[in-house]
Image (tube, rainbow, N blue to C red):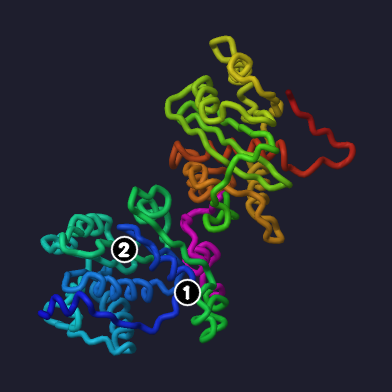
Amino acid sequence: MDRSEQAAVCLRGIKYAPLPSQAKFHRSEARFKGFSGPIGSGKSQALCQEAIKLSYVNAGRVGLIGAPTYPMLRDATLATLFEILDANFIPYEYSKGDNVLTMTDTGSRVLCRSVDEFERLRGTNLAWFALDELTYTPEAAWLVLEGRLRDPRAERLCGFGVWTPKGFDWVYRKFVSEPRRGYETTLAQPFENRYLLEQIPDFYDLLKSSYDEAFFQQEALGKYLNVQAGLVYYAFSRQAHVTETHVRPEAPLLWALDFNVDPMCSVVAQIVAGTVYVLDEIVLRHSSTLQACEEFHRRFPSHPRGVVVYGDASGNSVHTTGTSDYHIVREFFAENYSDSLHYKVPKANPSVRDRVTLTNSKLRTASGEVQLFIDPKCVELIKDFEQVCYKADSTVPDKDKDRRRTHVSDALGYLLWQECRPLPQIGDRGRRLL
């Protein structure tokens, strides 16, 4: 057999006991995949192990491993890669002159590149590529490499990256909040790396004593947040709160509206045994209350236990048309809905502070109990929970930075206030309208 035929049947064992998140990352068959986690979660190890695997799967083909700068590539990424190769006696040759690594038993070539001058990445067809510390990499570099992932003789085309969260940047949008078809991301859990903790038991305690709370949550817990401003919904965690939900026939549907014109926002939820399950959101640009009703009816044409309507108390105000938002809702459902319909709308909205405090307490109680779960299709509500911050030196949520933010979480807050707020003490009067 010639060298290419020998490479095609070459097998190689590696000593590697992946952590659960690493194993999930390796199992992914997505064309583009990511591994997001806190420091110490084994991201570079996962990146290099996947690169070695793909160099064998794509025997005789060309791949690329990169980092934001050459010092980062040399001192971190390649150091990990060479350590794995040497520990497992995998034969390779490395040319420092052109920064190319050749796997000698397969003939595969690995281009080792910094991506700070990403225009130099053009020209070579790749079977796979891997980028370390992706949040420090220009998006344009990723896009250039996407375009090079087109080797027709590759067995498995794949582009992947690993990173520590760094706010709501392009990596967050592309891989986490708005992933396109073909993208998949593994979110590593904090404190998962038992090997690290066996060697340095106080690793995270030392970080906590050095970092401020927000930076600790980002770097050590792997949370996506804006470290430059105070998060309103600080208790939210995508890992803890985002999960698939389903309609339960034994509980009524709870529909809560925020009467904003653009976007018109509402959420649909159920409460079962004190736990809130957000099933869906309805976010309509440049729309009316009637259009929101029509969309709700399209998605939920009937329900055996009926519907309860909640929302912004300002919806009781009469518009210049001579009617109110809630009047429009009543008229629509009187004509189009056969199941029972009830309303729980206050005469006045609760204070923002009280509503936010209650929402955070449902996200996570003081004892650590989670009492609120959100379906992953509720992308705008998740964005609210992750991105809404207070204005500088105030306790007022910033509605001006992004006009799309706050409205969906406001709608949910109205529902929670009606159903989950602490009962008033004897002698207090808690009055509800409708």
| Residue plotted at (68% across, 46% down) | 358
Q: In this view, does 105 lie to the left or right of 206?
A: left
Question: Of the residues shown, which amino acid type is indicated by label 1?
Answer: Leu
> Residue 282 location, x and y as percent?
51, 33
Q: Which of 118 and 281 is in front in this view?
A: 281
- Is residue 228 inside the magenta stretch? yes
> Residue 193 location, x and y as percent?
50, 76
Q: In this view, does 322 lie to the left or right of 376?
A: right
> Residue 200 location, x and y as percent?
52, 84
| Residue plotted at (64% across, 20% down) | 338
Q: Give the range drawn in magenta.
A: 208-232
Q: Name the residue under label 1.
A: 19
For the question of whether residue 308 can be seen, the reply is: no
Question: Of the residues shown, which amino acid type is indicated by label 2?
Answer: Phe
Q: Mark 2 points at which residue?
A: 160
Vertical position of residue 275 compared to residue 339: above or below:
below
- Judged from the image, the secondary structure of the residue bearing numbered disc 1 is loop
Q: Quadrant of the C terminus?
A: top right
- Mark 2 packing: few (<14 Cα in 10 Å), some, or many (20+)? many
Q: In this view, does 74 lie to the left or right of 375?
A: left
Vertical position of residue 52 compared to residue 141: above or below:
below
